[in-house]
C-alpha cells in the first residue's frame, strides 16, 4: 500500500508538535491513522485498561452498507494495544458490532 501524505491541517493548527503527532501516527499505525483522519471508517476509538492490567484498543465504524463494525487490539500498555489494533485493521478483522449484554442475555 502506498504511503499517503499527512492530512492537510487547518491554518491555525499547523504547529510543529501537532505535525509530529500526525507523522508518528501515520508511520506507526497507518491504517488506524487513515481511518481517524478520513472519518469514513473509524467513528469511535477507545483505549482501556483491563482488569488483568493489560490494555485493549477498540475502534468502531460502519461498513460500506451501513452495518456497525468493531475491531479490537490488545497489548501490555496503551500504545501496544493501539499497535495491536493496527494489525487487526490491516488484517481486515472488522466484525459486526453487536451491543454487549451482561451474562450473554438476549
Image (cartoon, helix red, strand yellow):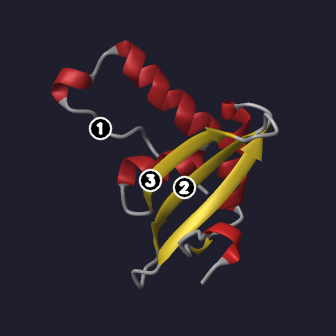
Which quadrant of the figure has residue 67? bottom left
Asked which secondary structure carries label 2, the reply is strand
Task: From the viewer's perspective, tell me whether residue 69 is left or right of residue 38.
Answer: right
Q: Between disc 3 and disc 2, whose residue precedes?
A: 3
Q: Are marks 3 and 2 in contact (CB under 8 Å)?
A: yes
* Residue in view at x 73 percent, y 36 percent: 80
Q: Are marks 1 and 3 in contact (CB under 8 Å)?
A: no
* Residue in view at x 37 percent, y 62 percent: 40
- What is the crowding at mark 1: few (fewer than 14 residues within 10 Å), some, or many (at least 20)? few
Give coordinates of residue 66: x percent, y percent.
39, 80
Q: Which residue is mark 2?
A: 59
Q: Report how far apart the C-alphas of labels 3 and 2 lie in the structure.
A: 6 Å
In the orientation shown, which residue stands out farthest toward the left? 11
Observer able to see residue 63: yes
Q: Are marks 2 and 1 in contact (CB under 8 Å)?
A: no
The mark found on residue 8 in the picture is 1
Q: Which residue is mark 3?
A: 44
Amino acid at each position: 500500500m502506498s504511503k499517503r501524505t499527512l492530512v492537510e491541517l487547518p491554518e491555525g493548527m499547523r504547529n510543529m508538535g501537532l505535525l509530529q503527532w500526525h507523522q508518528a501516527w501515520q508511520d506507526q499505525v497507518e491504517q488506524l491513522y487513515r481511518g481517524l483522519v478520513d472519518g469514513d471508517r473509524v467513528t469511535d476509538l477507545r483505549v482501556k485498561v483491563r482488569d488483568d492490567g493489560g490494555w485493549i484498543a477498540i475502534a468502531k465504524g460502519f461498513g460500506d452498507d451501513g452495518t456497525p463494525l468493531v475491531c479490537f487490539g490488545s497489548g501490555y500498555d496503551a500504545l501496544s494495544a493501539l499497535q495491536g489494533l493496527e494489525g487487526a485493521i490491516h488484517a481486515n478483522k472488522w466484525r459486526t458490532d453487536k451491543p454487549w449484554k451482561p451474562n450473554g442475555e438476549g
